[in-house]
Amino acid sequence: MNSTSTMKTPMKRVRGLGSAHSGTDHFWRQRLTALANIPLTIGFLCVVYATLGKDADAARAVLARPFDAFIIGLFVISGVIHMKIGMQVIIEDYIHGEGSKIVALALNTLFSLAIGAACVFAVLKLTFGA
Amino acid sequence: MTEAKTRPLSPHLSIYKPTITMTMSIVHRITGMGLYAGTLLLTIWLIAAASGAAAFAPVQQFIASPLGRIILLGYTWAIIHHALGGIRHFIWDTGAGLGPERMMLARLTLIGSLVITIGLWVLGYAVR
């Protein structure tokens, strides 16, 4: 009765995601990648164990095996998304200057993208050969 | 103006006596940042491997050196501690583990991370 200025229901406001224009997707993605990271870390450790004590050529051959390359690729992608969101939370918690915050957030995104691209490129090159 | 300056601040880290739950929470964030930096080493490892045996051999040599092993040991502990801390967060997400048992969960995170790290390294020396 007291809000005659709008016909919007609270549900409509939730769907519109408010003034931030984004909702809980970071929260959700952080948990999804955290869940994926558990088996992927175990898989990555298995690949690392397979390279232990091997010379450079033999270790490269291990990393080039399709399944091993696949595991490393997934590990890197899930890990990089997880660490990018995690560092963003840290930046938003501790860096309060508007300018330095935007710079830090941009650097975080660029660093994460570069790391992810470099690792995926390296794995693909290893598995598809020279 | 002077009133604004003497406004009370909400209490922050420095005012509390450290507890195991608080310390494990801080360590979770620190290991996260360590793992963030560690991805640079993972990238060097993979790019060197992709570049060929001539580039990969010195990287392997460095990892096998005492300094390389110390870094890798720290990396192992950081990833295991962060993983166990993450599992603790999943337990909290269900609404459980927030009562007095949170002390036990925090201790398990620390002890578990040390035990698993040592176990992984013993396994590593065994399979090598």
Image: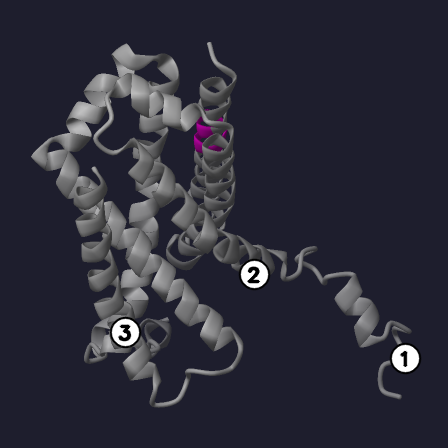
Q: Which chain does the numbered disc 2 sit on?
A: A
Give the class, few, some or many, for how many residues have Cα within 10 Å of label 1's Cα (few <14, many ≥20). few
In the image, are marks 3 and 1 on the same chain?
no
Which residue type carries mark 1?
Answer: Thr
- Residue A27: mark: 2
Q: Residue B102 vs residue A114: left or right?
A: left
What amino acid does circle 3 point to? Leu
Task: Find residue A55 and report its image quarter.
Answer: top left
Residue B107 visible, this angle: yes
Report the residue at 51% width, 58% height from top: A35
**Main secondary structure of the magenta stretch:** helix
Residue that mark 1 sits on: A4
Mark 2 residue type: Phe
Q: Secondary structure at mark 1?
A: loop
Query: What residue is at 31 percent from the left and 25 percent from the top?
Result: A59
**The magenta stretch spans residue A117:** yes
Q: Is residue A37 above or below residue B101?
A: above
Please say if the residues under marks 3 and 1 sit with CB atoms less than 8 Å apart.
no
Q: Position of residue B40 (x, y in %)?
A: 33, 33
Q: From the viewer's perspective, is residue A76 above or below residue A17?
A: above
At horizontal 20% and vertical 62% (from top left) the residue drawn is B114
**CA separation in Å, label 3 and label 1:** 55 Å
Q: Which residues, given as a range, are shown in magenta?
A: A114-119
* Callout in the foreground (3, 2): 3
In this rendering, do the residues under marks 2 and 1 share a single chain?
yes
Q: Secondary structure at mark 2?
A: helix
Name the residue tied to disc 3: B108
Between discs 2 and 1, the one toward the N terminus: 1
Q: Position of residue A97 (x, y in %)?
A: 42, 50
The chain to which mark 3 is attached is B
Colouring method of the image? one colour
